[in-house]
Amino acid sequence: MKVLVAVKRVVDYNVKVRAKADGSDVDLNNVKMSINPFCEIAVEEAVRLKEAGVATEVVAVSIGEKNCQEQIRTALALGADRGIQVEVAGKVEPLVVAKLLKAVVDKEQPQLVILGKQSIDGDNNQTGQMLGALANMGQGTFASEVVVEGDKVNVTREIDGGLQTVSLKLPAIVTTDLRLNEPRYASLPNIMKAKKKPLDVFTPEDLGVAVTSHLTQVKVAPPAARQAGIKVADVQELVDKLKNEAKVIS
Amino acid sequence: MSTLVIAEHDNSSLKTSTLNTVAAAQAIGGDIDILVAGADCGAVSTAAAAIPGIGKVLVADNAAYAHQLAENVSLLIAEVAAGYDNILAPATPNCKNFLPRVAALLDVAQISDVTAVESGDTFQRPIYAGNVIATVQSADAKKVITVRTTAYDAAPATGGSATVEALSAVHDAGISSFVNEEVAVSERPELTSAAVVISGGRGMQNGENFKLLEGIADKLGAAIGASRAAVDAGFVPNDMQVGQTGKIVAPDLYIAVGISGAIQHLAGMKDSKVIVAINKDEDAPIFQVADYGLVADLFDALPEFESSI
């Protein structure tokens, strides 16, 4: 079966992002960009399914400007077979991303679509679920285990206070959580090989999707700072403060 | 203006996150109704009807909604949404699962994790792991919103008498089914609703050392959490993770032990009323948000703290 895995180019996990002084947007000049960590877990899961003989082909798709081909190449170096870029300029809202992915799903007919549960820039946690609704597929979000059995997939999900397992008819959507796997590092030979793997580029017009905007970012600002308190000398002073000053323990 | 609040519940009790969401709905203004989707959830609808200021409680009580499978519940909500300007749900794992499906079915954007309402169409929400607060304006006639529950104090739970109306519509998409659930049985309160939370970070060194937190948690009636660093290092499971991509908590007392204070962790706990940090590195960023900081080796401080409370 074919697995489609979505990857997003985002600010690297280790970069501390700041709002620009004029509040127009975050400052992304000269910062390191990487594959979104949850997307990396998605690629790893797809590649493991292929290594286990469950998947026959892994296709990595990204939606963005030309430079997102770097992240597609990263996915190819990790073991995906070929790439698709949908060329879109600027920021794209999750609903539009879901519509573009739906068009790619229609074209590619994968049995499983694996996405990260959220991207660490917009923190929306929407795209996988929206794709599920548009494609009328079942979804296993926040997955910590994925088991394909015949024409179904069992997904174990992280919920409040524990785990829930759902059974989904294929084709289906999976969004990844941290516990699903630990992504490998791409080896140098695989990075070289990835450069030769096929990568197709489409425009939204090719896919018949209108890129619309529903939300306007009015401004961005740093979060309200919390006042630092005091340092206490020892445990006894700490207990005293908590009992008599903050009155949070008795 | 009318708002539909989606109730968070487990078929037997209404969760407090629903009350936080009602408070956000009140900040928007207008009429507020509540939708309860579940199975044998009569007690939940009774509780929802007791919330003051609610017009009516719509109850879809059917086996198809027993586990609130996203594929089924989203069809129901999208249908009921026809009569409302705003659809609000708490940003819990459960509602985050189904609400984006509702937005897609309605062909509108979802605004996730709203922390403040500026006007009927303009909202604040944290992005980039809480490093930045974005103000966004929606052009959609119908707004689908999840609410960061720690940003709103719970609305009162009793004193109201809303009418309860049963919905007969049954939506079963037939593409998913519930298999099982393993919910950790614990004497301790849930992380997201506990009045006291004690969390360990990489400084705990291993999972075994989290036992040092248990005695304190037992004495304080606290839930135990962890930083992402501790989860990534394999000390404890991911469901204990407090942070932007984990659980968002705002207890009366938060005790951070051996946690340096990465922004992704701070985003998950900085709305706590009182923050205590115990760390041997006096320059750790956690001290910049702590009300009470103790520079000490946690392996000395924790046993002494436990015996002093």
Image (tube, rainbow, N blue to C red):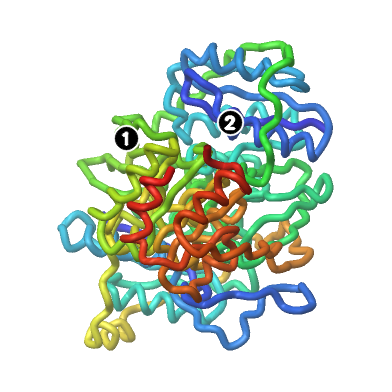
* Mark 1 and mark 2: Cα distance apart in space: 20 Å
Question: Looking at the picture, how far across and down is residue A27, in whole percent?
Answer: 66, 79
Within 10 angstroms of label 1, few (less than 14), some, or many (20 or more) residues? few
Return the chain for callout 2. B
Vertical placement of residue A245 versus A213, above or below:
above
Please name the amino acid that badge 2 sits on: Thr
Q: Secondary structure at mark 1?
A: loop
Q: Please give left or right for residue A160 compared with residue B254 in the image.
A: left
The residue pinned by badge 2 equals B16
Q: Which mark is residue B184?
A: 1
Q: Residue at x 56, y 59 (%)?
A: B292
Q: Choose between B141 and B129: the one closer to the eye.
A: B129
Residue B99 in the figure: left or right of residue B136? left
The structure residue drawn at horizontal position 56% and vertical position 71%, both measured from the top left corner, is A203
Disc 2 is placed on an element classified as helix
Above or below residue B179? Residue B38 is: above
Residue A192 image offset from top left, x and y in percent:
28, 88
Q: Amino acid at mark 1?
A: Ala
